[in-house]
């Protein structure tokens, strides 16, 4: 599997969509970027695609929106994640829902 590389414009767009929240940390992930809360990723960049991790009911709803789809490698998309439509903006409720859903999960233990 070849991991797509985002352009600088893709990275800038991603950073512009990440909520300005003191709990959030942006980190590099395999040449892409991830936004984390409590050590868990809630939003990711995969090439030009931006995806979010949502509660199952929200995933079902977002899946019906034009432009949304699987997130991650085509041969192995990430479970519980969806790519946001390209027209998404920073005030999208999907980004806020992803942050709050993942913030409610148990924190990841720091690696030694």
Image: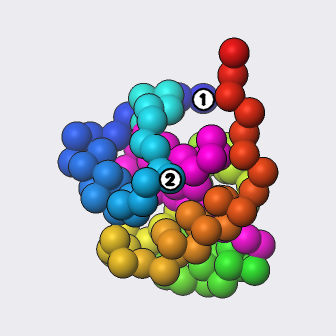
Upstream in the sequence, badge 1 or badge 2?
1
Give the overall secondary structure of the magenta segment. strand
Residue 69 visible in the current orientation: no
Q: Residue furthest front?
A: 22
Residue density around tag 1, few if under 14, some if 14–19, many if 20 or more, within 10 Å: few
Residue 1's mark?
A: 1
Residue 64 visible in the current orientation: yes
Depth check, mark 1 against mark 2: the one in front is 2
Residue 46's mark?
A: none
- Across and down, in percent, residue 32 comes to 43, 36
Question: What residue is rendered at 43% in x and 54% in y?
Answer: 22
- Across and down, in percent, residue 71 comes to 58, 55
Residue 91 is left or right of residue 79, and the answer is: left
Range of the magenta residues?
33-56
Question: What residue is rendered at 58% in x and 74% in y?
Answer: 97
Residue 23's mark?
A: 2
User: For residue 55: magenta?
Assistant: yes
> What distance separates the C-alpha of mark 1 from that of mark 2?
32 Å
Which quadrant would the C terminus be assigned to in this image?
Answer: top right
SS for callout 1: loop
Residue density around tag 2, few if under 14, some if 14–19, many if 20 or more, within 10 Å: few
- Across and down, in percent, residue 43 comes to 52, 55
Question: What residue is rendered at 34% in x and 71% in y?
Answer: 90
Closest to the observer, 17 or 2: 17
Question: What residue is rendered at 65% in x and 59% in y?
Answer: 103
């Amino acid at each position: 599997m070849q991991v797509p590389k985002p352009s600088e414009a893709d990275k800038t767009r991603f950073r512009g969509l990440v909520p300005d929240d003191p709990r959030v940390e942006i980190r590099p992930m395999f040449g892409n970027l991830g936004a984390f809360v409590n050590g868990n990723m809630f939003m990711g960049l995969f090439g030009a695609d931006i995806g979010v991790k949502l509660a199952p009911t929200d995933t079902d709803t977002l899946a019906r929106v034009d432009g949304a789809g699987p997130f991650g490698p085509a041969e192995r998309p990430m479970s519980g994640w969806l790519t946001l439509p390209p027209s998404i903006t920073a005030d999208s409720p999907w980004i806020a829902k992803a942050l709050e859903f993942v913030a409610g999960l148990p924190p990841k233990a720091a690696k030694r």
